[in-house]
Image (cartoon, coloured by chain):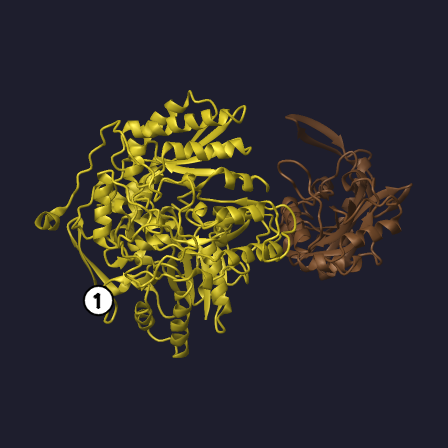
Amino acid sequence: MSWLFTYPDTYEIGLPNQGLQILAEIVTEHPDAVAERAYAPWIDLEAELRAHGLPLFSVEGHRPAAMFDLIGFNLSAELTYTNLVNLIDLAGIPVRAAERSEQHPLVCIGGHCTYNPEPVADFVDLVVLGDGEEVVSEITDVVLEWKASGRGDRREVLLALARVPGVYVPAAYEVSYDGPRLRSIEPIWPGVPAVVEKRTIADLGAWPYPKNQLVPLTEVVHDRLNVEVFRGCTRGCRFCQAGMITRPVRERPAEQVRTMVAEGLRRTGYDEVALTSLSTADFSNITDIVGELAGNRPPADGSGDLCGPVSVSLPSLRVDAFGVGIAAELQKGRRSGLTFAPEAGTWRMRQVINKLIRDEDLYGAVDSAYSQGWRRVKLYFLTGLPTETDVDTLGIAELAANCIEVGRQHQRSPGVTVSVGGFVPKPFTPFQWFGQNTAVELQRKISLLRDAFRDVKGAQMKWHDPSATQIEGLLSRGDRRLGPVIESVWRRGGTFQEWSEHFRLDLWADAMAEHGLSMDDYVHRHRTEDEVLPWSHLSAGLHHDFLWQDWRDALAEVGLPDCRWTPCYDCGACTGYGIEHVVASATPPAGGSQGTGQGLSWTPDSRPVPVELGVGARGRRSS
Amino acid sequence: MTRLRVRYNKRGRVRFLSHRDVARCLERAVRRAGLPVAYSQGFSPRARLHFGLALSNGFESDAEFFDVDLVDPGPADPGSADPVDLRSTMERAVAGHLVGAGGLAERLSSVLPDGIDVAAVVPIAAGTASLQDSVEVCTWQFRLVEVPADALDAAATRLLDRDRVEVTLIRKGKQVSEDLRPLLGEHSTRMSSEGAVLTIDLGTKPRSVRPVEFLAALDAPELIGNVADVRVLRTHQWINLDGQRCEPISLPRPSTHAEERAS
């Protein structure tokens, strides 16, 4: 029994993916299974492979992909979907699942994009929702049994897999349509669940993986030791799919973090470690751990020194949890870049998205950074958020300019890099009903900001291409009718769409027109409450009513506190699965706004852009 | 501070790693081996490794070198110019981490990828010239499959019989002409089971002759269709010590004919 874990982008991008490394290691520990890895060959290598009639092959053994029993793809970004199709084809496997036979590998996908796998449903045999640590072995065992019993009908093994909790087999469900809308998504195979629930591991401490992180010989992104300190986040930012689908918060025990860091550094020879999570500054007693690592102080357990200076990077820092203490500890090691994500330019906008950090929280964080010697900080923002006005958009430039002013107290020429992304509504978030801004509107907002930044000395602005954002939005909330669109784009050479030099809006626009589908309807339309969404038959544990109420609260600019430190509001993620938060500290990090009872008052400074609440027929009846 | 000089091979698939990739790899290996490596001062401390002449991507070698600085365990040894004393200093420096200097090569090899093997480690005296400065000549081996040795030898002899070997290159946006002839040394040719093998010394001062430059200068398209098909191996690097030509670290046995085990 063999798995080929594949990332549908280049080795340089895909190798650091921790999910695939964790799964490959767990499979390798199975007595009857092996795992190898593959990545998308770049354009030139693919041309050579095709010219010589060679298939996609594994990195470890250079074995053809079609020799494996299962090909497991990680889907982290929608724009890789055409690469998924391309790699299946390069493996020598029919791209449509319906055309595969017993001798072909099973094609499996996992990762955050699988919470709406419908656009790629035609191409895959099975989909895994949620944490893979447990279910990967359950799938392995089902396939082992199928092979032992003579590898019979393909449908037989898929039926058995569809009964594994967390596994969704698209072929087992039928979608019916009512014009442009979905009417229903119903199981058509016996014994498969009407709603597929995600998998969640209750205790991260039981899974200290990867134990043997891979050390690439060539340069890759995130080329460092990565130790996941917790999974899940309940800050409740309404735009953030990761924070909604990975609930609840499960912290790794601090002692295990120390051991994984010390052993990982010794084993790999890295001199940089990233403590990863969705919001690392929220980890209980983070300052102590960072201090030990960056200051190269021996850990309390006496596990020895760390073989030289170590630089510590903390991706995903919340500004209200970043204080001078942690900054002072960080700068003892080799200083790495600091990125904060205020996400929106005004307090009103941040109430809408429930990112409850005040301007002062941000200024406090950058003050800590500049005072501890950082010369430049990076700020991440979204534009195109629900109800966003030009005042909100321009607030981004104002905040950035003020940050530079704060920096001038400590630095001669402080710098700020502002990165602006277009907002894409994602499934299983309160904003899943929101009609995305058009590319034209996003471009207008970006231009506004560019003009505003022209006079801000020390500020550098970067932004994402709004037309790529549009296609990300199309695929994010699309349904099965996008399968032929993806296939058309792929057949016309549209691979590596997340690479700006290869992105081809024209291919997508042509394919949509060719298949009679409306970009506006898929991307820019507000959804109604009673609408059957393409992911209605899947569940991340979140109650529909919770999400809808949160969407209404967003439009009413009402914030929601973090439930890890305040009472439960029953979103469904814990109660539905009989699990709960695993958090070492019962109090939020010092200095924050959220959940600390600090004043969150706000004076209106602009009239929000109205969003029509489409409650639909059912909503009207009940209200 | 103790400085060690390390000699290693680069063979097989790892020949496709760039010089920078190998440098990063060696830096990690030094840490993985638990050596008390010294770090530079400043905002961004780096491990103090010093590399020699870069080996182009795609080429193999039996004679690569780097120097690494280790921190001393105690006060500086006043008699550190004495090689014997130096060795004991180093052994003290690595005490607790290593069995002794003899185990160092094996220890480093065990934490390096397949194809990179450490052949020898020696302490060097303070003030020893850097590899970059001191290496004057490299010996290169070119293997050409399905090429008769006599034809290859004739091409090389023709080249070496010339008084000048002009090459033109772009330097700082300007076309310049250089004479490679003074940098072309002794050559020999033989037949092996895998084809013709040409061995030649190429100088490095004032600048290194690149192996592909030499192949181009041979001007033998009938023998060399595609430069990428030629297997290139650096067998030696030579320094000048008091008028004596010798290697930065010479091995007990010369590592000739090692190509038979290459993949």
Q: Residue furthest bottom?
A: A149
Q: Is residue A305 left or right of residue A613?
A: right
Q: Position of residue A260 (x, y in %)?
A: 54, 57
Q: Position of residue B62 (x, y in %)?
A: 75, 53
Chain identifier of the brown chain: B
Q: Nearer the viewer, residue A198 or A59?
A: A198
Three-letter amino acid code of the residue under disc 1: Ile
Q: Nearer the viewer, residue A39 or A546?
A: A546
Q: Position of residue A589 (x, y in %)?
A: 42, 45
- At horizontal 54% and vertical 34% (from top left) the residue drawn is A372
Q: Is residue A511 above or below residue A128?
A: above
Q: Residue furthest left?
A: A621
Q: Which color was chain A given? A: yellow
Q: Residues within 10 Å of mark 1 (few under 14, many from 20)?
A: few
Q: Residue furthest top?
A: A455
Judge whether residue B90 can be spotted in this image. yes
Q: Is residue A101 above or below residue B49?
A: below
The residue labelled by disc 1 is A188
- At horizontal 67% and vertical 28% (from top left) the residue drawn is B171
State which chain disc 1 sits on. A
Q: Position of residue B173 (x, y in %)?
A: 63, 26
Total residue callouts = 1
Q: Looking at the rendering, in which quadrant would you find the N terminus of chain A?
A: bottom left
Q: Is residue B78 above or below residue B97?
A: above
Judge whether residue A47 can be spotted in this image. no
Q: Nearer the viewer, residue B163 or A282?
A: A282
The image quarter containing residue B12 is: bottom right
- Secondary element under disc 1, as helix, strand or loop, is loop
